Image (cartoon, coloured by chain):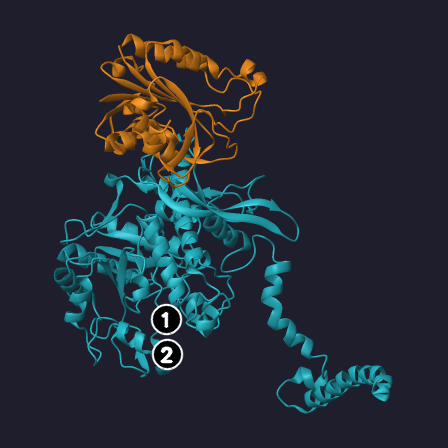
Amino acid sequence: MKVFVFGGSEAVGEHVLKALDAKGHEAVTMAEAENRAEELKMLGAVEVVISKDEGFERAITGASAVIYIAGASPGAGENQATLVDHDAVIDALEEAQQQKVERIVYLSPVRMDESQESKKTGGKHKPEEWITKSRFTYTIVRTTKTVSKPGNGSIKAGETVDADSGEVPYEDVAAVLVEALGNENTFNRAFEMTAGETAIKDALDAL
Amino acid sequence: MGKISKYLPSAIMSTSVAAPLAYMAYMYQKDDRQKQHAILRNFPLLGRVRYVSEHVGPELRQYLFAEDNEGEPFSRLQFQNVVKAGKYNERLLGFGSDKDFEEEGYFIRNSLFPKLSTEMRVDNTEKTNTYKYIIDNEGLFSRKEHREEAQVDPYFLRDEDAIVLGEGRCRQPFHVKGQVGMSAMSYGALGERAITALSKGLAIAGGTWMNTGEGGISDHHLAGNADLMMQIGPGLFGVRTPAGEFSWEAFREKAEMEQVKAFEVKLAQGAKTRGGHLEGKKVTEEIARIRLIELGKTVNSPNRFVDYDSFPALFDFIEELREVGGKPVGMKIVVGDIESLAEMVQIMKESGKGPDFITIDGGEGGTGATYQELADSVGLPIMTALPIVDELLREYEIRDRVKLIASGKLITPDKAAIALAMGADLINIARGFMISVGCIMAEVCHTNTCPVGVATTDEKLQTGLIVDEKLYRVTNYVTSLRAGLFNVAAAAGVDSPVKLERRHLVYKDNQGRISSVDNMLQQIQG
């Protein structure tokens, strides 16, 4: 299936491209420069749009799914000004919807214990609210802090997970996003994930 | 019983005063009567202060009095940079450089429009799994830190940019995706633990190589499955017959090994342009097996290949090595006799023969046990030697087929980058790697008493060196060196360190005057 990856050039994104390629999907993403685009193709992307040359509108045509990785650290402090341009997220997803994309897997960028105060200035809930009301078959994945460590292939997932300090390797987050893509048990629901002992597929099946 | 306890305190008291006094009196008269040292005859006892201070001086200076930029062969800061890169995989510093900018030296000409990280031609698609240290809290007397797993970018060159030794000239050219590797260090010079840690660490880092040194391929070199460059020295260790002749059979056996990627014929090295001497008692069963020499028998090796005393003879030997082995063959030299080098390059051009790569060891190269007069003043330093060879090869238009490997104190990314810009394709590092596995520059490599178990085969001293700990320091050192090379390239405005050229350099003298560095050969030829 053709999958458009927003944030494919980020740390988690690189692993997503690799995992999609390994599962036989056609990954399309964006990069800032030609050299970076080549590197993303080496990772497994079939097409990379150079963002300074053109928008993503053309490349998203014909995609069956979108994986959206918003690039803000979940470890960033509360009560900061907006870390993600939430309006841009919504704009992008509206375009995807117009292009008849049916499926979305959205990696939530902000820490999951976001306070009421933070919600006022942050706005993490905005894209999530939009997604749940949209026509997409959605999966919202909220993760604890992501780190550059080798993946374990195992996590802990649930409606809520109480693990403030749990660190999840980029590789495992990427594997969850790609696994969720075709896992019907994750359709139209949001869940939280952190480091754990359960194999990724089993963890998602058991949600 | 009562009597003893009554007199004991005063007995101890008087003994503790009398004994040292007696000892001092004895030493005094001994110093006074001896005929060896004038200072002790004139100033008995007191004169000993001189010898004690002289003995502990290097350590005291290093710990207390040396400024950060002082100290040879490597300053405190250079040493720390290597250690930090290995341990923390971190090279950032705050509040600016401590370098003395009044001094003369080479500087990188930075571009006003440096490359963005997304514009670099790097290959970070295969991440490297390693371990690094994180500092939790640092106090005056203690530092709390812990080691954790990490996944880091390897900073490989793209496949198209990879340096290829022996391209189009042998059956199995050697593709290297990184520009730094380990210079020749034999098993025996370094202990098995150090070599094992290096082999494993280099293998994890990938895109690099390990030169076996002239002591042959040991099991420890093979331990990690790193790419090997086998060195062949005048002693012919590992490729000789019992009588000391070159053995084609032994060579073929080595060439068939999967891990061996290239051969290097060693004509000279920076540290020693002298013959070797291997004491019979050091020739253990293992050493005898690796080097193909007789157990327990002293081996003296000459300072030159006895059979090859001219370029045509040497090149015929190299041709045959390449033909039989099917792998690239290079040679290691120290630059001194420039006329002779010009002749060599001319012969290479005319005959089409010669090495696939030339390793140029700067006169400042080290680690081998040698004599002070050879270490200090024989051979040109690398930043002079390298451009001369580069220019000669260009002049005769054979630069494409001969890759250049530079070595000589290039242990930090800036120094390595300058050498690349000066004409090197690859960088060889020895002492930087020794530091990464624990060397503290005690400078006793030749005595087998290395206090950190690196340059020693002593079992007991080696117990201090934990392979599983140090191997990741090697991995981190290599990856951060490569990251540093990309940093310098980006600053110079090119998208890969393979594109660094002399136009990216400038030489500044101690009065602030600058000159370009593109006419080294002209200066010599007048």
Chain letter of the cyan region:
B
Residue at 77% of width from left, 85% of height from top? B21
Q: Quadrant of residue A12?
A: top left
Q: Chain of mark 1?
A: B
Which residue occupies 66% across, 51% down?
A: B140
Residue B302 percent across, percent down from the top left:
29, 76
Foreground: A195 or B293? A195
Secondary structure of the residue carrying numbered label 2 = helix
- Tag 1 near tag 2, CB within 8 Å: yes
Q: Measure how far apart labels 1 and 2 are at the Cα level.
A: 9 Å
**Residue marked by disc 1:** B188
Count how many numbered circles sit on residues in the image: 2
Tell me if mark 2 has few (under 14), some (14-19) or many (20+) residues whose alpha carbon lies within 10 angstroms of its own: some
On-image quarter of the C terminus of chain A: top left
- Extreme-top residue of the structure: A98
Q: Secondary structure at mark 1?
A: loop
Rendered colour, chain A: orange
Q: Which mark is residue B157?
A: none
For residue A207, side relative to residue B290 (left or right): right
> x and y percent of residue B20 in the render?
75, 83
Q: Amino acid at mark 1?
A: Gly
Q: Nearer the viewer, residue B160 or B489?
A: B160
Look at the picture and state if B473 lies above or below B364. above
Residue B115 position, x and y percent, is: 39, 31
User: In this rendering, does residue B517 appear at all?
Assistant: yes
Q: Which mark is residue B282?
A: 2
Q: Earlier in the sequence, mark 1 or mark 2?
A: 1
Residue shown at 27%/24% (left/top)?
A182
Q: Nearer the viewer, residue B52 or B338?
A: B52
Q: Amino acid at mark 2?
A: Lys
Name above or below for residue B503 compared with residue B341: above
Residue B119 seen in this snapshot = no
